[in-house]
Image (cartoon, grey):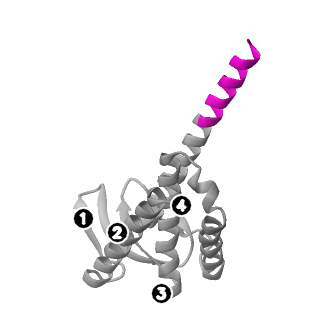
Amino acid sequence: MGWRVWIPLGAIFIADRAAKYWVRGHMDIGESVSIIPNFFHLTYIMNPGAAFGFLSGQGWLFVVTGLLALGALIVFRRRVAALPAAAQCCVGLIAGGALGNLFDRLTLGEVVDFLDFKIWSYIFNLADSAIVVSGILLCALILREDRAALKAKENDEGK
């Protein structure tokens, strides 16, 4: 694995840690600060579950899952290195997000969440955003590659 994985991983981990550090140092739990009224607030909560509070109180499960995900990255590092550049970047962002939330679970027992879009009923953090957005993008990249391979195969068979 090269820089296309490690730089996004490190960048999201550092940004996530910095944002959570700021929130914990400048806000009280439950406090909400309006950034864009009725649309976006910073709201400090502690989340004992997964994304969107799913499986609240099962922190050990998420620690194991995070460790397995990061272990898989190490075990499959050669396969990851063979992926297209955009896919490697997505893997790095997903791993960085997983590491950010794993750090919270290991040090705090819960995850710091603070991004509160009022049009959405859930509060989340930068790590969650990196995991979800990069996961969707990675799926789209895989589907695009699959379509291209299928089209190439059809063209070869038609000759």
Q: Residue furthest right?
A: 157
Residue situated in front as seen by the camera: 145 or 97: 145
Tell me which corner region of the image, top left, top right, bottom left or bottom right, holds residue 36.
Answer: bottom left
| Residue count near mark 1 (Cα–Cα under 10 Å), binned few <14, some 14–19, many ≥20 | few
| Residue at the spot of label 2 | 15
> Contact, CB < 8 Å: mark 3 with mark 1?
no
Q: CA distance from mark 3 to mark 2?
A: 18 Å
Foreground: disc 2 or disc 1: 2
Q: CA distance from mark 4 to mark 1?
A: 41 Å
Residue 133 relative to residue 57: left or right: left
Question: What numbered label is drawn on residue 25?
Answer: none
- Where residue 41 appears, as percent x and y from the top left, is 30, 64
| Residue at the spot of label 1 | 34
| Residue depicted at x 42% and y 60% | 8
| Residue at the spot of label 3 | 108
Residue 34, compared with residue 38, is above or below; it is: below
